Image (cartoon, rainbow, N blue to C red):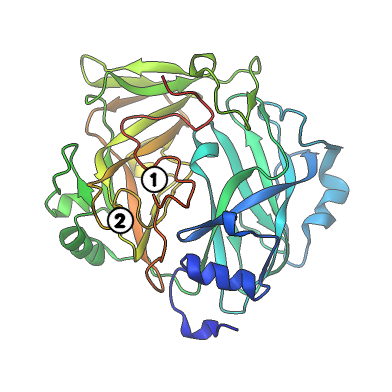
Amino acid sequence: MQDWSQITGGLAMQHIRQLIADGHIKNAAESHLQPSSLDLSLSDEIYRMRGTFLPRRGETIRDILKDGILYQTRLDHPLELFGIYLVRLDQTLSLPEQVYAITNNKSSSGRINLQTRLLVDGTARFDTVPKGYQGEVWLEITPKSFPVKLGHGERLNQMRFMTADTRLTSQEHFALLDRSELLCDLSGNALKADLSLVDYDGIAMSVDLSSEDIVGYKCSPTACRVLDYSRRDLDAREFFEPIHRPTNRQYVMKQGDFYIFVTKEGLRVPGNYAAEMAAYDPSKGEFRSHYAGFFDPGFGHGLNGEVRGTPAVLEIFTHDNDFVLRDGQPICKMVYSRLASPAQTLYGDTRLASNYYKQQGPRLSKHFKMS
């Protein structure tokens, strides 16, 4: 049995595998493992809810179900646009007292504007699992752009485990940016470390509206089309409208619409770090700049540092007002954190399902056939 009091930081794949072997995570297979996260899978227990909620201290999710559901449904029935659903996940937890966890959307669910938020017993916060938690794990799911048909075993979100908060300070980000060439331009040249790139305990990245003929995609909410999550051959034109490079390098985002854009910089995550994109920074504008948020070690870096950066795809939803987006405008913040030990398997390894390993330019989710 692992002595978790001797481990400090985020847990890489080898440590998560040990949690499974020691019985701290049930119903997780080797295929669920990522370099520093665990894919969570849907069970077939699903409820249509009256609204969203958070449990009070000492209150279980099943306590809330007694009064909070509209009806029990089936997972293979399409989830309605803007409907709020609660699904029990296959995995259950019995964490060591030193280990806690947080969760994020996976890229494939974020890129179709499918909002997921984790809930556990007695915790009045989304996407948070306290130290030593024991019990079931639930996922609130809300389609924000179109109805979605899911299936048992689908993996919409991922869980990261840690024993301490090892996010870097501004000074540490600057030093790592200089030492490890975290950002590259489109030609793969490292961007020189500059204080303008460090943004309040993170690294600033900007939007690209000029490098590709198609710089992004737009989706307006509609109930007329259903996305089957199991498909890999959908016609993108039925769900998204391409955004061609604007001649004035500006684009007006409309309130309530969903957009896919990409960063101008290529991101690199060394094997002993993980990175997270801040989901919403009001100082950058009245929009949410990312759902998925999490980047495993090896992203844009490769197994031996051979990859010279991969642009980060931005999943943007405007909040209150139309917003004029301009080429090169700072749009998000990347926050790096230390792992307790370097990941033994990195993003892009052929043994993993690294769907967006070599993405260039704005790319839709894996559900759509590539032109």
Residue type (three-letter) at the residue carrying disc 2: Gly
> What residue is pinned by disc 1?
281
- Which mark's residue is nearer the viewer, 1 or 2? 2
Q: Earlier in the sequence, mark 1 or mark 2?
A: 2
Q: Amino acid at mark 1?
A: Asp
**Picture quadrant of residue 122:** bottom right
Mark 2 falls on what kind of element?
loop
Could you tell whether 58 is left or right of 326 in the image? right
Count of labels in the image: 2
Vertical relation: 312 (above or below) 194: above
Q: Nearer the viewer, residue 168 or 183?
A: 183
Q: Residue at x 70, y 43 (%)?
A: 52
Q: Position of residue 44 (x, y in %)?
A: 78, 44
Residue at the (15%, 49%) spot, across then down: 190
The picture places residue 142, in percent across and down from the top left corner, at 65, 36
- Quarter holding the N terminus is bottom right
Alpha carbon distance from label 1 to label 2: 12 Å
Secondary structure category for the residue under label 1: loop
Quadrant location of residue 140? top right
Q: Is residue 190 left or right of residue 57?
A: left
266 over 56 or under it: above or below = above
Disc 2 crowd rating (10 Å Cα; few below 14, some 14-19, many 20+) is many
Image-based side of 138 in relation to 368, left or right: right
Is 96 positioned to the left or the right of 36 in the image?
Answer: right
Q: Residue at x 53, y 81 (%)?
A: 4
- The x and y percentages for residue 296 are 41, 55
Q: Residue at x 74, y 44 (%)?
A: 86
Q: Please name whichever residue, 328 or 365, is drawn nearer the observer in this view of the structure.
A: 365
Considering only vertical position in the picture, is 254 above or below 114?
above
Mark 2 sits on what residue? 202
The quarter of the rendered structure image containing the C terminus is top left
Q: Quadrant of residue 312?
A: top left
